[in-house]
Image: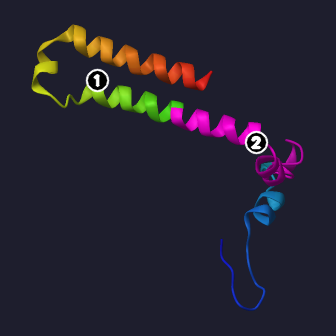
Amino acid sequence: MYRAHFGIRHNMKDLLDAHITLGGRLGRGHKGLYDTINNSLYFQLGLALASVGVITSLVAQQMYSLLAYAFIAEDFTTQATLYTHHQYIAGFIMT
């Protein structure tokens, strides 16, 4: 984040710890979230797999809606199987 030569700075840990929900009725907010993410390999793996799964799902939808090859536009079965194939991959990655 922003860091100056004079010791004035913002970092992610301070920003997350200072965050309080509107009204403050939902608990401690984001206190400890930075340490949890940085110290837990399982949390990092979960975030990475969720990101790759969402990207794979978006690729499936993009390939289904905007066809890259002319011959795929004529064959609905190929379109449907490509879409289903990539959605299955996304589902397996996200679970």
Identify the magenta region: 23-52
Q: Which residue is mark 1?
A: 64
On the image, the x and y values in percent for residue 18 come to: 82, 61
Q: Which residue is mark 2?
A: 41
On the image, the x and y values in percent for residue 79 come to: 25, 16
Q: Where is the N terminus found, in terms of image quarters? A: bottom right
Secondary element type, mark 2: helix
Q: Nearer the viewer, mark 2 or mark 1?
A: 2
Residue 83, disc: none
2 or 1: tag closer to the N-terminus: 2
Looking at the rendered structure, the kind of residue marked 2 is: Leu
Between residue 1 and residue 38, name the one nearer to us.
Answer: 38
Q: Residue at x 73, y 73 (%)?
A: 10
The quadrant in which residue 12 appears is: bottom right
Label 1, residues with CA under 10 Å away: few <14, some 14-19, many ≥20:
some
On the image, the x and y values in percent for residue 95 come to: 63, 21
- Pick out the residue farthest to the top: 77
Q: Is 5 on the left or on the right of 91, as rendered? A: right
Q: Residue at x 76, y 63 (%)?
A: 15
The quadrant in which residue 61 appears is: top left
Secondary element type, mark 1: helix
